[in-house]
Image (cartoon, rainbow, N blue to C red):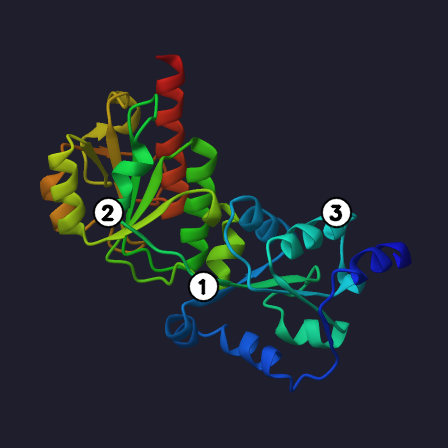
Amino acid sequence: MQGGMMDVNCFVDKELSSPHNPLIKEVMRLKERRQRDRTNRFLIEGYREVSRAISSSHPIEELLICPELFLGSQEAALICAASAAAAYIVRCTPSIFAKISYRDRPDGILAIAPQQHRFLSDLLPLLRGKKEPPFLLVAEAIEKPGNLGTILRSADAAGVDALILCDRCTDLHNPNVVRASVGTLFTVPVIEATSSQLLAWCQENKISIFAATPAAEQLYTDVSLIAPLLIAVGTEQLGLSSIWLKNADIAVKIPMCGVADSLNVATATTLLLYEVMRQRRRH
């Protein structure tokens, strides 16, 4: 461990031992959505999350580290990469890092980064040059940060081209979204739009809409998911709104054999995405 500490010291720009430092106070404020919205900045905590941000070229402004809490041997390389990308490296004592951490068991890595937003005008350039038909996912008014983060993780694993957040309730940059996504927030393009804007875009670009709802007659495994498509999932409690159900080309359901009438939205989304991947690989 002593060797690991010596390795990172050459990258440190400043050391903090006081919890009253303005930077520490700013980190504490960024745990609140109001401050994130006001400053357009957010927190990225954890080795995997920060490393995926850096490897995806997401800018890092400050990187706060506590070598005493490191869990592995790769942190020095991460800190070197952050420093090379012009991040300001700040070393904290264990007591200060425990104060600023969002986690019960922090691993000594926390970054402050600017938010980056994409809109419908960015979607076609993202799809240009893709060999496979477009594979899109829309999440309408998802309320729970953990569900949104898990949906991002599944979208990354299944090869979704973009996740579109429509009429969103949850702050995309909530620390729990970043954590539940294990950094895939930085690998899956996220587009923000209203439902009406996205519906018009799908019609213009000939993208079929598959609405997931327990009220559908067709099973999700009984329809072809090869063509350009967008899968739409809705809120945890109420599902998709009427605008999506009325404008969907096909409504599909997941079979339920027990007393529960629906699945957790992140679980249901994962099943749907992997069925698309299964069909396309078989095709």
Point out the tag, 2 or 3, that comes first from the N-terminus.
Answer: 3
Q: Is disc 3 placed on a helix, strand or loop?
A: loop
Mark sitting on residue 174: 1
- The residue that mark 3 highlights is 74
Asked if the residue at tag 2 contacts the one at tag 1, i.e. Cβ–Cβ closer than 8 Å, the answer is no
Q: Nearer the viewer, residue 29 or 247?
A: 29
Q: Earlier in the sequence, mark 1 or mark 2?
A: 2
Determine whether, in the image, residue 227 is placed left or right of residue 29. left
Q: Position of residue 63 (x, y in %)?
A: 63, 63
Identify the residue shown where x is 15% and y is 41%: 201
Residue 252 occupies quadrant: top left
Q: Position of residue 5 (x, y in %)?
A: 84, 60
Inter-mark Cα distance, 2 to 3: 37 Å
Q: Residue at x 40, y 56 (%)?
A: 116
Label 1 to label 2, Cα distance in Å?
22 Å
Figure check: 216 above or below 85? above
The spot of residue 209 in percent (x, y) is: 19, 35
* Label 2: few (<14), some (14–19) or many (≥20) C-alpha neighbours in 10 Å: some
In terms of depth relative to the viewer, which is nearer, 182 or 270? Answer: 182
State the SS at label 2: helix
Residue kind at label 1, given as amino acid type:
Asn
- Which quadrant is the N terminus positioned in? bottom right
Image x and y of residue 226, in percent = 28, 20
User: Position of 205 compared to 27: left or right?
Assistant: left
Among the 4 quarters of the image, the one containing residue 151: top left
Which amino acid does the dot numbered 3 rest on? Gln
Where is 153 relative to 173, above or below? above
Residue under label 2, please give it: 120
Q: Residues within 10 Å of mark 3 (few under 14, many from 20)?
A: few
Q: Earlier in the sequence, mark 1 or mark 3?
A: 3
Q: Amino acid at mark 2?
A: Leu
